[in-house]
Amino acid sequence: MAPEPGPRTTGAGPTGGLVVRRARTNDIRAIRDLVRPHAESRVLVSKDAVTYYEAVQQFRVAEVGDGSPLLGCGALHVMWEDLAEIRTLAVSPAAKGRGVGSQLLEALMADARELGVQRLFCLTFEVDFFTRHGFETIEGQAVEPEVYAELVRSYDEGVAEFLDLERVKPNTLGNTRMLLTL
């Protein structure tokens, strides 16, 4: 088994000294604080604290140095053998436009490659951002019928969004379903 990748640090530039690392349980309150304004404006889905704790191993966070306020967060949720979703990608208003979201996304993409995932899904209002990173808008189903039949059994709302199930449409109107092949 390959060793666990460590934090990724950037040098000089708009995000100089930025560290992207795996989230820890003591980051959950800060992650919720980062997500809260996006959830209130219905850009991101609101989640209970327990959901974040259950998924802490899926998250990466960005900070300038250990102990500094978090500048961003994002999660990689595996959905199937070759498919994962980029979830809860959020950047603090103070860090917008400084490359934090891009660095988080790159780290999550590296995690996906390490896991053997070949395709990444996202449901987003930030179409231009994800397009710059190679994602393309999808229509209809992006999986084979037998995989669809298995995925439809999932209780996970993200899977329902990926499958474009009618029951999630009132919660996701205006979002765009996008996919990237790694």
Image (cartoon, rainbow, N blue to C red):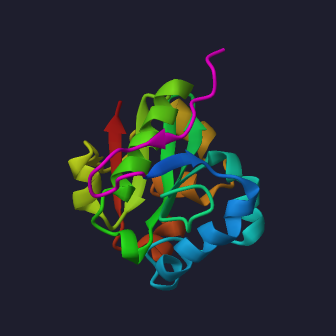
Q: Residue at x 50, y 48 (%)?
A: 20
From the image, give the main secondary structure of the stretch colored magenta.
loop
Could you tell whether 98 is left or right of 55 in the image? left
Could you tell whether 59 is left or right of 51 in the image? left
Residue 148 percent location from the top left of the image: 53, 39
Residue 152 percent location from the top left of the image: 60, 47
Is residue 145 visible from the viewing direction of this image? no
Q: Is residue 65 above or below residue 113?
A: below
Between 154 and 84, the one lying in front of the other is 84
Residues drawn in magenta? 1-17
Q: Residue at x 47, y 40 (%)?
A: 8
Residue at far top of view: 1
Q: Is residue 14 above or below residue 60?
A: below
Residue 25 percent location from the top left of the image: 75, 57
Between 17 and 134, the one lying in front of the other is 17
Residue 19 percent location from the top left of the image: 49, 49
Q: Residue at x 43, y 38 (%)?
A: 109
Instruction: Choose top left, top right, bottom left or bottom right for residue 149.
Output: top right
Between 96 and 176, the one lying in front of the other is 96
Quadrant location, the N terminus: top right
Is residue 41 visible from the viewing direction of this image? yes
Instruction: Choose top left, top right, bottom left or bottom right for residue 29.
Output: bottom right
**Residue 160 on the magenta span:** no
- Labels in figure, total: 0
Q: Is residue 132 above or below residue 70?
A: above
Q: Residue at x 38, y 75 (%)?
A: 94
**Residue 6 on the magenta span:** yes
Quadrant location, the C terminus: top left
